[in-house]
Amino acid sequence: MSQKNIENLKKIEALVISDVHLGTFGCKAKELVSYLKTVDPKTIVLNGDIVDVWQFSTSYFPKPHLKVIRQLLKMMENGSKIYYIVGNHDENLRRFIGLTLGKIEIANKVVLNLNNTKTWIFHGDVFDVVMHHSKWLAKLGANGYGILTLTNRFVNGVLSLFGKRRISLSRDVKKAVKGKSKNITTRFESTVADLAIKKEYDYAICGHIHWPEKKLIKTQNGEVSYLNSGDWVENMTALEYHNEDWHLVYFKPEMKTNNESIAANDELLVPNEKTMLKAMLNDIIHN
């Protein structure tokens, strides 16, 4: 990218995206590339589930998905520092926690100091009881989500033929589960908020649940700004830090511009899944 093009981009201190699920049919890779080409962040946090290893297939990884990786590498070459926080769908990378390659660092969590505030960022699967105690059920749910996404694509194709508004089946399901009131704080949000307040963080950012959010949560022990970066399967959202605050941003068509593996060979050196999970839990909660 030329210097002139870089100067025309939106300058932000930090960018958080999560739950891209590269390698799945539902991934909105084209939209993500278009969005990334409009911003120039000093720091990029990839907050988990960027590549979906659970549903990964060597027969499906189209060019737009590869372009997401290329665009991120291009942004790194232009000066952006990238943190890759490992999620549950890309958990195989957990064995490389602490590894730094150039300006890319693989981590369980990141704490950013921005304008005399502290932002705590982690994926959030550590608080998912179903994922850890009934992993087969979580994977079954992920497959079901994938089928729902394909069904949604077909339904929207039919609706577009008749000039009807597009719908999101998975989003409607989540709304039914979560409830309509934005004033309701879920157990997931409360758990994150309680721990963030205890650690005296100003902001707590998660992904994982595919529910973009920004709210102030108050408890008897204090308050914290809770944010969720959403996903790039249905919501197409990101978190941007500029003007001394975090902002939840939704992708819009007008954002489009005209700019167009590590392998572990010695399994004896790789800790087992329970050991890595225990280390992650300790890293996120106690450090």
Image (tube, rainbow, N blue to C red):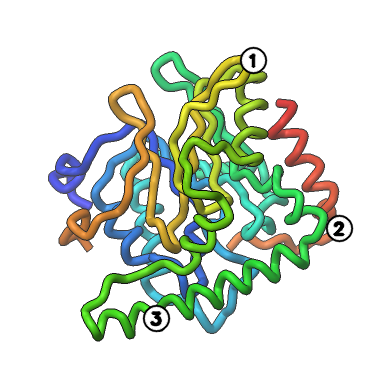
Spot occupied by residue 18 in the image (x, y as percentages of width and height): 49, 50
In whole angstroms, how far apart are the C-alphas of marks 1 and 3?
Answer: 47 Å
Q: Is residue 64 visible?
A: yes
User: Residue 282, located in which quarter of the rendered image?
Assistant: top right
Nearest to viewer (mark 3 / mark 2): 3
**Spatial distance from mark 1 to mark 2, Cα to Cα?**
45 Å
Q: Nearer the viewer, residue 218 or 265?
A: 218
Residue ID for mark 2 = 268
Secondary structure at badge 2 equals helix
Front-most of residues 151 and 117? 151
Q: Is residue 101 above or below residue 53?
A: above
The residue wearing badge 1 is 221
Badge 1: residue crowd in 10 Å (few <14, some 14–19, many ≥20): few
Q: What amino acid type is highlighted by mark number 2?
A: Leu
Q: Nearer the viewer, residue 63 or 236?
A: 236
Is 169 drawn above or below residue 240 in the view shown? below
Q: Amino acid at mark 1?
A: Asn
Label 3 neighbour load within 10 Å: few <14, some 14-19, many 20+? some
Residue 247 found in image quarter? top left
Q: Which mark is residue 67?
A: none
Question: Can you identify the residue that label 3 sits on?
Answer: 155
Residue 286 lies, in percent from the top left, at 74, 27
Residue at disc 1, secondary structure: loop
